[in-house]
Amino acid sequence: MNFDARYAAQSFKSVGTRPIRPDGVDKVTGRARYGADFNMPGQLVGCILRSPHAHAKIEKIDTSKAEKLKGVKAVITATDLPDLTNGDAAMYDILDNCMARGKALYDGHAVAAVAAIDARTARQALKLIKVRYKVLPHVTDVDEAVKPSAPLVQNDVFTAGVDPRPTKPSNIARRSQYGHGDVDAGFGKADIIVECSYRTEQTHQGYIEPHACVASVNSDGTAELWVCTQGHFVFRQHCAGLLGLDVSKLRVTSSEIGGGFGGKTHVWIEPVALALSRKAGRPVKLVMSREEVFRASGPTSATSIDVRIGARSDGTITAALATLRYSCGPYDGMWAEIGAMTAFACYDLENVRSVGQEVLVNRPKTAAYRAPSAPMAAFAVESAIDELAGKVGMDPVALRIKNAAKEGTRSSYGPVYGPIGIGPTLEAVQKHPHMNAPLGRNQGRGMACGFWFNFGGQTCTDLNIGVDGTVTLAVGTVDVGGSRASLSLVAAEELGIPYEQVKAVIADTSTLGYNDMTDGSRGTFSSSMATISAARNAIAVMKERAARMWDIPVKDVDWEDGHARARGKKHGNLPPLSVKDIAAAAPKTGGPIAGHSELVADGAGVSFATHICDVEIDPETGATKVLRYTVVQDAGKAVHPDYVEGQYQGGAAQGIGWALNEEYIYGEDGRLQNPGFLDYRIPVCSDLPMIDTQILEIPNPNHPYGVRGVGETSIVPPLAAIANAVSNAVGVRMTHIPMSPPRILAALDGKKAG
Amino acid sequence: MNFDARYAAQSFKSVGTRPIRPDGVDKVTGRARYGADFNMPGQLVGCILRSPHAHAKIEKIDTSKAEKLKGVKAVITATDLPDLTNGDAAMYDILDNCMARGKALYDGHAVAAVAAIDARTARQALKLIKVRYKVLPHVTDVDEAVKPSAPLVQNDVFTAGVDPRPTKPSNIARRSQYGHGDVDAGFGKADIIVECSYRTEQTHQGYIEPHACVASVNSDGTAELWVCTQGHFVFRQHCAGLLGLDVSKLRVTSSEIGGGFGGKTHVWIEPVALALSRKAGRPVKLVMSREEVFRASGPTSATSIDVRIGARSDGTITAALATLRYSCGPYDGMWAEIGAMTAFACYDLENVRSVGQEVLVNRPKTAAYRAPSAPMAAFAVESAIDELAGKVGMDPVALRIKNAAKEGTRSSYGPVYGPIGIGPTLEAVQKHPHMNAPLGRNQGRGMACGFWFNFGGQTCTDLNIGVDGTVTLAVGTVDVGGSRASLSLVAAEELGIPYEQVKAVIADTSTLGYNDMTDGSRGTFSSSMATISAARNAIAVMKERAARMWDIPVKDVDWEDGHARARGKKHGNLPPLSVKDIAAAAPKTGGPIAGHSELVADGAGVSFATHICDVEIDPETGATKVLRYTVVQDAGKAVHPDYVEGQYQGGAAQGIGWALNEEYIYGEDGRLQNPGFLDYRIPVCSDLPMIDTQILEIPNPNHPYGVRGVGETSIVPPLAAIANAVSNAVGVRMTHIPMSPPRILAALDGKKAG
């Protein structure tokens, strides 16, 4: 589908087809090697001792007994990871989070670690480490933390982004603001104003595979790291920085990854494993348990958001305002800021302001979780928009179409949009049969929109053509969602050869140039740009080789449909040369044929989605059943539609869990009460309907094939769509996520009481 | 030292220094991962059943009992490796050698293989495989094999290279001939003619690490191979061809290598491991025992060589003729041909002819062994030259200097030499104190010359610059002798950064373009050319980046001494930018910085050496002690002199073992009687003196730094140098190598009897 005549449909042969996934056989037969599936001869087992307190001064750590235990080869504390961050605050926070320095800041914060000959010995050694804590008052709740009376998570944090600089420390680490126009004037022009506060609880990405790595540091300052990560080049840089190594001396290999969703973009155990290996003089394997993953990896923020929207009686929004408080764990983040940027990004607004506050709490350091921060902001804003539609008396879809951003709109976070998909997704939803399907008793329907920026960034790809004309593609963006298949399709498209003749692998950090993380939905977008560039460089080489084979000037050689063709009548009788022909001759025409690309992938096209959801509430139990779910999203060009649909479905599924059930539950003592999949309930197959998808293709003009990122936007609308559906079913506006059975029952009770 | 003013000494900062080897720590601490040090989850153990007969028809293989044994996951025979070679005779020989097809051709020839859950089960299963052999007459001796009455090793081999084509099959697979001039006329002009026949026995490279691999074939036609090899790209091509895979679908990673010396340039167990894995559906690890290495990997040829040389009374050689018979095992080879090419390569001859005969015998398929075929030819020719010197009454060194090849000489194998080192090595030897040191009773001194071609070939290198300005170098030539250090020196030289900031790794076949084997002394020669080219490409990128940083035209940027410098007065105040400066800015100036190179390294400079050796004979036991040994060899430019000296010493050490002790001993039954280091005696430390070295540097004009290969030439002179020394000590011309104690005693007895 093409919404803009300027980007007329390109004709693709490989791109847009749906070959079976190349990593599938490995994964279903158990042969794929994940983080824990690698071993080095002589490796030790690492274990981490974690704080049982939410907030405590570490007065003394006595490791002497543990060190004496037979089979223990190294015991480390923060002193074994000296501060080499040289004033880099973000790096310091990473260091402090990997191993507490002076204070334990949350339940689960690492305070010491052991490497021993086996797991049993390592666990026994942990018990022999004596830590003297002085327990401090703690705060885990985002609304409690911003109160002036709250215990301070850090003693020396003064809210940044506020002028003049505050004189008293605070748990609000930083304030950020976005928007334009005059919001007060806008509200003055409004006929109707809605205003409400919303809360969301902290959730975890819930990836199947816990963090795992094998680290080996040599006495000569070179090191190796095998690790499950979304970005081995970034891990290399962080670990090398924390350990004081040249980046070139640390070789990081990314394993297969059993899910990341943003949670594997940060180092947690890896610097610890390296420090253990350095001290022990042997390789160390470190694998988190599920409990450790919950307590001490990086969940998303809990949030508290106030929204105020004003509109004229015809539905035109005149002003929009939001204040977003996002928990960051004990360290400054950019989470509320991203929330503030995304909150109103779907709309064309004259007057808009959003304010973000990064809130420190005694919980684990917040990490990215799929379109991080956007789902909560969308929950608040899209709930308010629905309220507004109700008050204006307009169909919620029509109200959104009326106010939707379009090409040329100045976005609420600054940039002016190019061709975008919010309008088309809304129009597709308006026409979708789902919107007019009948509903039964206790059932409700909701819809909502979502936005995500999509990232680009630094990307390198090497493309090598074998002597049989088949191709290896070495890419550096970890494949979290099928990008090896998508990039093979792109290489095949560009070279004009069958998909089956391309094999993509993720190269380690020593054999390819630097690549940013697979995050921000950048994997396929960026690496396909680099792949196209590398393939075109290889084609240029092949044209030279063909010219040499034919003994004609290279300017007389065209490349078309996977063949070199001699141009002009004088060469008319030369039969075209295929990639295979040229590759076979390569040893005699100049050697191996390759194309390379190092680039910064600029111009990732923004992405929009609109979701529809039907739910049924059980008034007895408060349980919510999702009856039907439809995702409509702009993919730019869908390189491998199966994977695009999978991303749409996956984001919706995670959003459903988040909306209805998932939450971190902390006790009064500041300890996490549900660090396991029995008590932290993610949706399983039987909880979900088949999630329908509709791919729209509004080409991204900055990408040769029009590709946009697709992986994250799908988790943005669900919280709001489901909240709108549940609110419609219950008859009460639901403002607190997850809408777990107790909260539904409370809402029903409130309604009866009201 | 510079012998030619045309190639004035370049000034080097890094190249020519001697940093400690980067792989040393790993190797001495046991952390280096060799062929057997890698494991895949779920892997099986492979074992190979080998023929106990030197020559036998395989009438039937019954694997049914083995297949039924609990824990056995796959049993294969030749039928599991169907012939996909499509008429490629060389590939067919490789296939047949990996798994006998119809006939077992030597003691140790693989006939079946098993993959089982552990080694015990696999070995038990081998015993349950019943093979019905029909034993055939065999021949293992090279002189016996060429007799018309000899049993035929292959029934359908008619000597190639003979016109007209013979009508009867023969064990002489092929005849080759080199030379020029009129040999008969040359002998007619001679005042003195020497003529003699020589024999050498078969030896093994004696690498410490047996062949080992882990293979994993997936049901989707993709496969992985971890393997100890001298050339993983060639292994990929051979294995992919034999298994019927696209080359891009087979990812081969080379392990560290515990010696190769040519013996790991051929596939032996790898296709078998892949076929087992394909059948079992699981990864398979296959490791040869030492006995298997001796019986069924690739030793060098046994030879029988006739030499005739004529000279005028002033020592000028007028004609030289050699006939060289080299055993190839059961398949055609190029061994006698290489012998024929190298035999007279040290000399400037008007009339010369050498004829090679590839001789089939019931022994394992001959493989390359360090300057393959040249040591035996040199032994014969250099012995004859010494004989000639004696008859002419000239000093052996002076006679050689008189006849030595020089720049412009048409070599005996065809090409005209450029600047070469045979003259300079001889002159250095003439002046060397070793030549004039006194000798005692039962002692003798010998010297001899040697030649090796050196290879170039297809080579790819990727050079990536990290954000901290340190560099990773991904090379594809397996590091058998320290090339990672040498190539890091070259990259450091070219970029103007310290050696310590470069880390070289051997990339796997999926992340780099094709590289020929590390053979023919091509590793450092070829990969340094590619490294220089890649570094220069990276410098071009850095100049562009500097121009962008300065906002000046790139044509105004010079690169000098590791810095970008703005040229011209108008930019006079811009301080130079280092690699580190430019790398740090890279994310904002266009992304990661890299340089790549794919090339055919042409122009490997030929290499010459002259060795001096002193021995003492024990007339009671016949034992020979090497008292003193000096190697003088041209290295072109010595990149890392420690490694160059190491190569000189290593070649000499191996030559000493070959000359004095090592040999394959076959029984009447055609079975190898000494497949182990107890009975096949390689020199140990206490057998050897410190081997002195002298590096000459006659720059190779085809290489930017003047580099030549250095790894192989050092094994060419020892057989002859020691034979000349022993002959001088014993007083009898020794014509049969090894000069083991029984042969020395026989010579002494013969002398007494004579």
Image: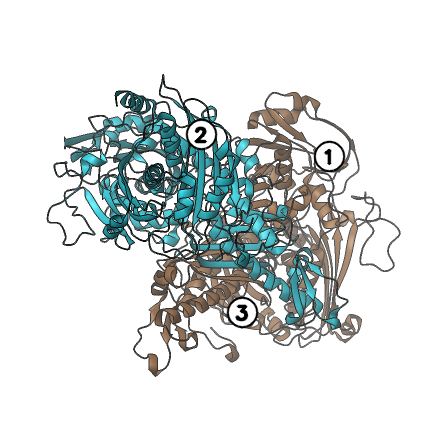
Chain colours: A brown, B cyan
Q: Nearer the viewer, residue A629 or B144?
A: B144
Look at label 2 and name its amino acid: Asp
Asked if badges 3 and 2 are on one and the same chain, I answer no
Task: Please give the name of the residue rendered at 79% of the width and 36% of the height, measured from the top-left corner.
Answer: A136
Classify residue A102 by image quadrant. Answer: top right
The tag on residue A641 is none
Asked if badges 1 and 2 are on one and the same chain, I answer no
Task: Locate residue A303 relative to residue B106 in the image: left or right.
Answer: right
Look at label 1 and name its amino acid: Thr
Look at label 3 and name its amino acid: His
Which chain's residue wears label 2? Answer: B
In the rendered view, tell whether residue A701 sits above or below residue A502.
below
Which chain's residue wears label 1? Answer: A
Classify residue B565 by image quadrant. Answer: bottom right
Quadrant location of the C terminus of chain B? Answer: top left
The tag on residue B614 is 2
List the single residue furthest toward the right: A167
- Of callouts 3 and 1, the N-terminal one: 1
Which chain's residue wears label 3? Answer: A
Q: Nearer the viewer, residue A527 or A411?
A: A527
Task: Please give the name of the residue rendered at 13% of the width and 49% of the height, measured from the top-left corner.
Answer: B166
Task: Locate residue B349 relative to residue B575 in the image: left or right.
Answer: left
Q: Which residue is mark 3?
A: A703
The tag on residue A79 is 1
